[in-house]
Amino acid sequence: MTDAELAAHLAEAAGRLLLAVRDSAMFTGKALGHAGDATANQFLCHALRHQRPDDGLLSEEEKDNPVRLAKSRVWIVDPVDGTREYGEERADWAVHIALAVDGVASVGAVALPGLDGGIVLRSDQPQPLPAMAARPRFLVSRTRPAPEAEAVAAALGGELVPMGSAGAKAMAVVRGEAEVYLHSGGQYEWDSCAPAAVAAAHGLHCSRIDGSALIYNCSDTYMPDLLICRPEWVEKVLAEVARFAPVE
């Protein structure tokens, strides 16, 4: 099984497991989110350690092991991206499985199990990008829209599209539901590694909001910002970001 096939298989299987936890009706709200996180994390970390024992591993739900820093290949996992949305039984949550090679998001799979039928978007099976909207649509947080995204959208005559998890937002650009995902409120490596790998494979631009490269498997896993967007909008978005957003 190739790395990409493994990522996709695990993302899909974890998604089914999470739906089973949700459908068991044993948990609701925050308790459901905690149960889903724990169950999916145990499954994914056990599977990756068994299937790729020589690789490093970084998961949101596991204590970080600095041994990964000496590894060229590191799996970066978010068992439930959008725990709040999952706990609220919404559709906009995701499962992230990525492989970073020498700091680059090289392989990824993002499962969206909450959608009807569930789907998995993969870095090894890119599809043509759908047609764009006349006005750029900017994906923003449901609860904390980034001021920079609001300002750039206004400057470019765009509209805001609130949505849950980072993976759901990034895949919405891949799926043609929006043109720009601009985030400046801080994330961690597991929030963007798999989405960036999948988005880049589909021909989207992926970077920091100053246009610099996304670098993974760092000792500090915090990532201040992220831009995933259609290539047609990169130049204009970066120019407007430079006016509004100082980069850390």
Image: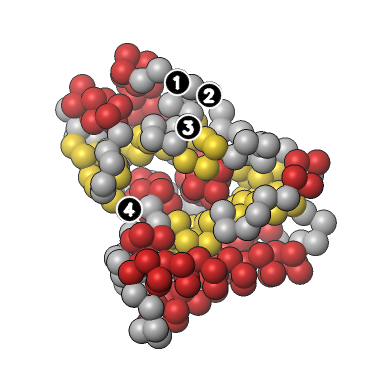
Q: Which residue is at a point 42% across and 67% down the rendered structure image? A: 33
Residue type highlighted by circle 4: Gly
- The residue that label 1 is drawn on is 247
Counting residues from the start of the chain, the first of labels 4 and 1 encountered is: 4
* Residue 80 visible in the snapshot: yes
Q: How is the image coloured?
A: secondary structure
Q: Which residue is at a point 46% across and 67% down the rendered structure image? A: 34
Instruction: Residue 138: give x, y in percent of width and height.
Output: 27, 38
Above or below, comparing residue 62 to residue 213 in the picture: below
Above or below, comparing residue 115 to residue 156 in the picture: below
Q: Counting other residues with Cα less than 10 Å from the Cα at mark 4, is it few (<14), some (14-19), or many (20 or more)?
A: many
Q: Is mark 3 on a helix, strand or loop?
A: loop
Q: Do residues under tags 1 and 2 come within 8 Å of each other at their CB atoms?
A: yes
Q: Please give the label number shown on residue 212.
A: 2
Q: Which residue is at a point 66% across and 65% down the rendered structure image? A: 45
Q: How far apart are marks 3 and 2 (CA)?
A: 12 Å
Q: Do residues under tags 1 and 3 come within 8 Å of each other at their CB atoms?
A: yes
Q: Counting other residues with Cα less than 10 Å from the Cα at mark 3, is it few (<14), some (14-19), or many (20 or more)?
A: some
Q: In the image, which is nearer the foreground, mark 3 or mark 2?
A: 3
Counting residues from the start of the chain, the first of labels 1 and 2 encountered is: 2
Residue at the extreme top: 243
Q: Is mark 2 on a helix, strand or loop?
A: loop
Residue type highlighted by circle 1: Val
Q: Please give the label number shown on residue 164.
A: 4
Counting residues from the start of the chain, the first of labels 1 and 3 encountered is: 3
Q: Using residue 18 as the reference point, say whether residue 76 is left or right of it.
A: right
Q: Which residue is at a point 34% across and 24% down the rendered structure image? A: 237
Counting residues from the start of the chain, the first of labels 3 and 4 encountered is: 4
Q: How far apart are marks 2 and 4 (CA)?
A: 25 Å
Residue type highlighted by circle 3: Pro
Q: In the image, which is nearer the foreground, mark 1 or mark 2?
A: 1
Instruction: Residue 218: give x, y in percent of width and height.
Output: 66, 36
